[in-house]
């Protein structure tokens, strides 16, 4: 069997969390460091959780964090995220449930996550959407803080679940930021950009993804492309 591996980003691609992550970090830094607006000057789109936390420390706590502090921040962050993720602005992106359902029915596609969220954060962020169960494996920011390394981990996990006689013939990285495109290129994978996050179609095009879509509303056309390319 020859598989096509699809690696999905979460924020801005599968869902819009209504700034659940940012709000959970704000609560965390307020509680632990007395800092009210920890996201000031930090643009988290496409960054991994450890990169975001580090930037908050440097820009707004004005210090280099040590391992223990980062660990403590993530512990508190997950506690807070469990609450902030249930908010009225949370939504699943148009066409995504249909797209995933269709892809899941076609044997040749393997669906995985490749996200800048740490593992538990990814699980919590997808909770209100009910989409978690579509993904058998993934690469997370708890595997590496570097996006292209997260992609490599995700591929390795996919290889572990297929038979020795099977093969992954193509890999598509699906995300909403230039950083997803850059990481895909570094890893040697194909990239699909979608303008459902904070980046427009023309901004994404500058980074020359293999494919770029306004949204996944026309999921049938996208499946055709994924099957034929
Ligand atoms: Mg994203």
Image (cartoon, grey):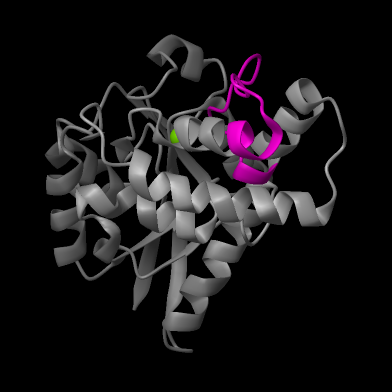
- Return the residue nearer the eye: 107 or 81: 81
Q: Which residues are magenta?
A: 29-50
Q: Position of residue 9 (x, y in %)?
A: 43, 44
**Taking 28 as reference, is 219 left or right?**
left
Residue at horizontal 64 percent and vertical 20 percent from the top: 42
Above or below for 60 versus 49? above
**Taking 48 as reference, is 70 left or right?**
right
30 in magenta: yes
- Return the residue nearer the eye: 27 or 2: 27
- Return the residue nearer the eye: 36 or 43: 36
Q: Position of residue 204 (x, y in %)?
A: 48, 19
Q: Position of residue 7 (x, y in %)?
A: 43, 53
Above or below for 83 versus 200? below
Classified by dominant secondary structure, the portion drawn in magenta counts as loop
Query: How many labels sit on residues?
Result: 0
Above or below for 104 versus 225? below
**Taking 27 as reference, is 4 left or right?**
left
């Amino acid at each position: 069997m020859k598989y096509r591996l699809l690696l999905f980003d979460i924020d801005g691609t599968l869902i819009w969390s209504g700034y659940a992550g940012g709000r959970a970090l704000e609560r965390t830094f307020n509680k632990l460091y007395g800092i009210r607006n920890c996201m000031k000057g930090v643009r988290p789109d496409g960054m991994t959780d450890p990169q975001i936390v580090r930037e908050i420390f440097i820009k707004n706590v004005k210090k280099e964090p040590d391992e223990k502090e980062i660990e403590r921040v993530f512990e508190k962050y997950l506690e807070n995220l469990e609450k902030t993720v249930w908010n009225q602005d949370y939504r699943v992106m148009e066409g995504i449930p249909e797209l995933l359902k269709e892809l899941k029915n076609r044997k040749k596609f393997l669906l995985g996550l490749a996200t800048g969220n740490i593992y538990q954060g990814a699980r919590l962020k997808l909770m209100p959407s009910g989409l978690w169960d579509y993904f058998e494996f993934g690469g997370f920011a708890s595997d590496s803080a570097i996006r292209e390394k997260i992609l490599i981990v995700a591929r390795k996990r996919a290889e572990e679940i297929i038979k020795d006689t099977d093969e992954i013939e193509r890999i598509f990285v699906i995300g909403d930021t230039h950083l997803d495109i850059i990481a895909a290129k570094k890893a040697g994978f194909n990239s699909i950009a979608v303008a459902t996050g904070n980046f427009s179609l023309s901004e994404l095009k500058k980074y020359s993804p293999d494919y770029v879509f306004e949204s996944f509303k026309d999921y049938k056309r996208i499946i055709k492309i994924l099957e034929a390319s």
